[in-house]
Amino acid sequence: MKLKDKIALITGATGGIGFEVAKHIGKEGATVIINGINNDEGAKRLAELKDAGINAEYMGFDVTNEDLVNENVKAIGEKFGKIDVVVNNAGGLGGRSRFEEMTTEFYRNVMALNLDSVFFVSRAAIPYLKKGTDPTIINFTSNAGWNAGGPGAGIYGTSKAGVHTITRALAKDLAEYGIRVNAVSPGTIDTNFHIGIKSTKPEVFASWKNNIMLGRLGQPEDVASVVAFLASADAAFITAETIQIGGGQALGI
């Protein structure tokens, strides 16, 4: 298997795309450590992974808390002696707010969830990535990082633009150690991220596929397969890149 004997940490992996990434990487032979903040969900997801024959562990900690990140990532690195793959998937919209009404607390919370988390987790993992085999960091940005997001999602877009840039900056910083750093930018993926509009305006959600060149919404598996590729030796000469996974959505039609 392509990722046999690899140790992979996936943040925000108790549902949606993150969990699909954990399954995909685990089926490729990696030991996966899934992270989340809902311990009940974490236990359920861990059981699912183990039932599928995947070596897995769950670690519940808030990726916006610097001290908890340092403590838990160190525990992973010390236990396994290395970390080979870090997937910074944790993130979210955090709600919607126009700038005029936006509180500083809202601003800081969204930036912390989407950008600070990438910095905290990556920084804590670097000493253990240096001990890894073909080590790599894979971050999650968004179309909103280019188009600034929809109404009320401006800070989400701003935070994701930061992820795009920190990906390239980390790649420059870590190349001398053989650590590759890339990002994926999913388009509209059919997950609970869009649960609000799916439940209140299902016809609007369904219509979003009309703006996608390939004529369908994305599925978590579409993203997970690309992440698994970037984590493997097949991508050994790819770094500082952001791969759009949106069926051509970024171009518009």
Image: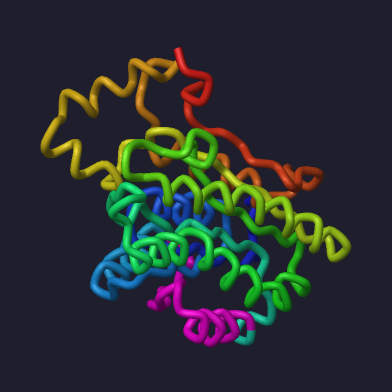
Seen from the viewer's position, the closer of residues 198 and 110 is 110
Residue 18 percent location from the top left of the image: 42, 54
Which residue occupies 52% across, 61% down? 115
Residue 109 percent location from the top left of the image: 38, 66
* Residue 245 vertical placement versus 172 (above, below): above
Residue 225 placement, left or right of 220: right
Which residue occupies 57% across, 58% down? 29
Seen from the viewer's position, the closer of residues 13 and 246 is 246
* Residue 246 vertical placement versus 25 (above, below): above
User: Magenta stretch containing residue 85, yes or no?
Assistant: no
User: Magenta stretch containing residue 76, yes or no?
Assistant: yes
Disc count in the image? 0
Residue lying at the far right of the rendered structure: 176
Which residue occupies 21% across, 44% down? 195
In the image, which residues are magenta?
A: 53-77
Residue lying at the far left of the rendered structure: 200
Q: Can residue 31 be seen in this view?
A: no
Seen from the viewer's position, the closer of residues 107 and 196 is 107
Q: What colouring style does the render use? A: rainbow
Seen from the viewer's position, the closer of residues 87 and 207 is 207
Which residue occupies 66% across, 56% down? 166
Residue lying at the far top of the rendered structure: 253
Residue 74 percent location from the top left of the image: 60, 84
* Residue 225 vertical placement versus 211 (above, below): below
Quarter of the image with the C terminus in it: top left
Residue 209 placement, left or right of 246: left
Q: Can residue 178 be seen in this view?
A: yes
